[in-house]
Amino acid sequence: MKLRYTLITLLFIMQNGCMPMTYPPGARMNASPQLGENIFLTEDGASLPLRHWLPKTEPRAAIIALHGFNDYSRFFDSPGEYFSKQGIACFAYDQRGFGAAPQRGLWAGSEAYSHDLQVLVRLVKQRYPKRPVYLLGESMGGAIIITAMSQANMPEVAGIILAAPALWARSTMPWYQTGLLWTLAHSLPWLTLTGEGVHVIASDNIDMLRAMGRDPWVIKATRVETVYGLTDLMDEAFNSATSLRGNTLMLYGEKDEIIPKEPTYAFLQQFLQADAAKKTVAIYPQGYHMLLRDLQAATTWKDIAAWINASPDKLPSGADNRAKQLLSSQLYSMFKFLRNEN
């Protein structure tokens, strides 16, 4: 009887037209966007919290870092400190709907996230007109960079760094997962999910994960429509493999339990066959999803710095060699086969 009432309720809700929503920026204001001390002021007047890590002397390069899903700009604290000591100016901001940014918990849409990034790139290039600017994205941040870089109006940058980018597109998900997501998003879009009972390990840095659990600015309960928006973004990023332009360093951990190997390797297959820009893939045998904060995070920082310096033929860790071995192995062929079977 309870099941019957539940089904009737769900049917009633669906018949009344519930739809997953996006919450885009408002109209553009007359005032120009600004790169403040602790605020990135956008074209529509939104104040996005900004963090920066600056060298004591004139920087030789700049990094704009984008955080992952439900995270915020603090994710770059330790990497930012490291890179600033290497002479690289670093900037990270809370993206719309995350951290202390406006409309917390609501999805602004991939177009809004890409546009904000484009605006900030222009501002950083104005501040450092003679210095190369790099983009670094973790998980969702990586997917945003991929989609932004695939657009014609994206300002030129020296290179992009993708740390375990969110590439779990619907085409690589099981049917029951996509079906459940669609049903919930079109019936109960406001429903919040906590992830309790989902046993995955995001990092081997347990102290860091516990600190995130205590951090009030890390979102713990997520609206279904926000997950739906993230999936739309992952679809767009995954399908942009052949149109992604520019020098690229992509990092991935063999122990990543958040973004599966199948979509990641399928993306790389197309990506590496595209244009002749400088492309380096690094796969870390002991790496988890949060590569920049894992226990071996310093290894990835050194690889990134070396790649920016463009001095060595190979990365210091040898993770690029590991990637070549995996991507040319029968394991890669197996994932390709499984994808075609689905």
Image (spheres, rainbow, N blue to C red):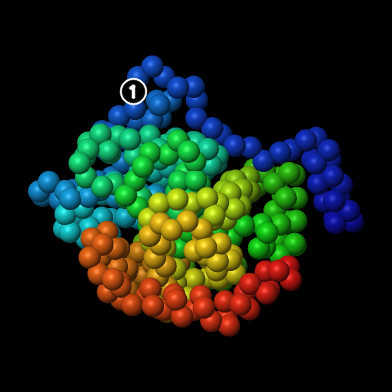
What amino acid is at disc 1? Ser
At 50% from the left and 36% from the top, the residue drawn is: 112
**Figure quadrant of residue 318:** bottom left
Is residue 126 shown left or right of residue 328?
A: left
The x and y percentages for residue 233 are 57, 48
Q: Is 67 situated above or below 342?
A: above
Would residue 336 be seen by someone viewing this image from the given angle? yes
Quadrant the C terminus occupies: bottom right
Q: What element carries label 1?
A: loop
Would residue 221 be seen by someone viewing this image from the given angle? no
Quadrant the N terminus occupies: bottom right
- Mark 1, residue position: 32
At 59% from the left and 60% from the top, the residue drawn is: 168
The x and y percentages for residue 44 are 43, 25
Q: Residues within 10 Å of mark 1 (few under 14, many from 20)?
A: few
The x and y percentages for residue 186 are 73, 44
Q: How many labels sit on residues? A: 1
Front residue of this view, candidates 95 and 284: 284
